[in-house]
Amino acid sequence: MTNEGKTIPTKEAPAIEPRPSESENPPPHHGPKNAHFLVKEMALVGEVATEDVWKWLAAGWSDLKANTAVSASYAALFIFIGLMMSFGFYFMGWPYLILPGLTGFLLVGPAVGIGFYEISRRHAAGEKVSLMAAVTAARHNKLGIFGFGIALAFIFQVWIRISFTVFALNFPGIMPEWHIILMRALSMEGVYFGISIALVGAVFAGCIFFVGAFAMPMMMDRNTILLPSIIASAYAVAHNRNAMILWAAIIVILTGVGLATAGIGLIVTLPLVGHATWHAYKQVMSGDLPEEYPTPPKPMQK
């Protein structure tokens, strides 16, 4: 612009730099450091996608192949315990508890998996992997891990008692003998019993998965105490709902395949789930704890 022959400079508007697309390599999201979480361990939780579930399985399979002898031996120990428990139910005259007892693998899975977590941890760190190290993995956090194990054992006992009640409701007045159960297995009562057991078992397994999906590996890896680990695990499952639903379904399928082969398939599926769970934990709980965790503001005094 000019005014009486003089040039008046004009100010150009500053250029607005385009914001980077969030879809292009988005950074992992973790809890904000100034967030007032119920427990500080919740700040560890990040976001994962459903595609990551297959990566966990691939990493778990890699660990299984690299440590086949140790992983299979550790799995065989618990399969043997399960078979002995089944024989015990049979000889004590409780054959109807064999199926609920075997499906209890889904309930005590977090406790069983601790040995596989230790194998994967040692393999990643380049440390020596041995069966003794897997069996004694609880030494990393004895109080928290044994406390969680006792809680799972109590829940398993409740599950067995409820299974007895479900049997009594579906077969009123019938003695729980093996030949009677086989005769009525394909009857309507048998079908209702199977559906009832499956539904009740799904509720139990879902609750344990919700609070225990990552509690055990967190206690072993970060030496956290029991309650914060459970709360953080529940938050991680809720925060990554879609991926966790897929992961839970895969665990059920792999465990079912293992049980359907008279337990033989568990030698493969049990370590696979255990190793993959470790890699799931390492990705989901990949954040850092804040150095100074904020406390909620105190209420103003009148």
Image (spheres, rainbow, N blue to C red):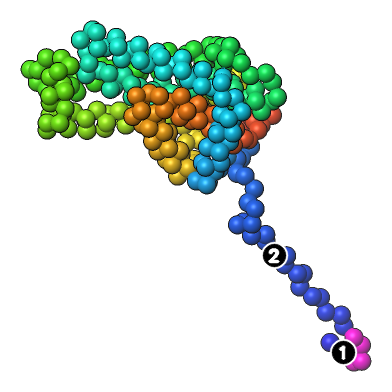
Q: Pointers 2 and 1 in contact (CB under 8 A)? A: no
- At horizontal 48% and vertical 20% (from top left) the residue drawn is 75
Residue receiving disc 1: 3
- At horizontal 40% and vertical 13% (from top left) the residue drawn is 81
- At horizontal 9% and vertical 17% (from top left) the residue drawn is 174
Crowding near the residue tagged with mark 2, few <14, some 14–19, many ≥20 C-alpha atoms within 10 Å: few
Residue 190 visible? The answer is yes
What residue occupies the far bottom of the structure in this picture? 4
Which residue is more in the foreground, 61 or 220? 61
User: In the rendered image, which quarter contains the N terminus?
Assistant: bottom right
Instruction: Give the amino acid type for the residue marked by disc 2 in the picture.
Output: Pro
Task: Return the x and y of residue 230 as percentages of the image width and height.
Answer: 48, 25
Give residue 18's mark: 2
Describe residue 226's horizontal placement relative to residue 5 as left or right: left
Residue at mark 2 to residue at mark 1: CA–CA distance: 36 Å
- For marks 2 and 1 on the same chain, the one whose residue lies earlier in the sequence: 1
Describe residue 204's horizontal placement relative to residue 287 as left or right: left
Task: Return the x and y of residue 130 as percentages of the image width and height.
Answer: 61, 16
What residue occupies the far top of the structure in this picture? 92
Residue 280 visible? The answer is no
Q: Secondary structure at mark 2?
A: loop
What is the span of residues highlighted in magenta in the rendered image?
2-7
Residue 156 is a magenta residue: no
Describe residue 47's horizontal placement relative to residue 161 as left or right: right
Q: Secondary structure at mark 1?
A: strand
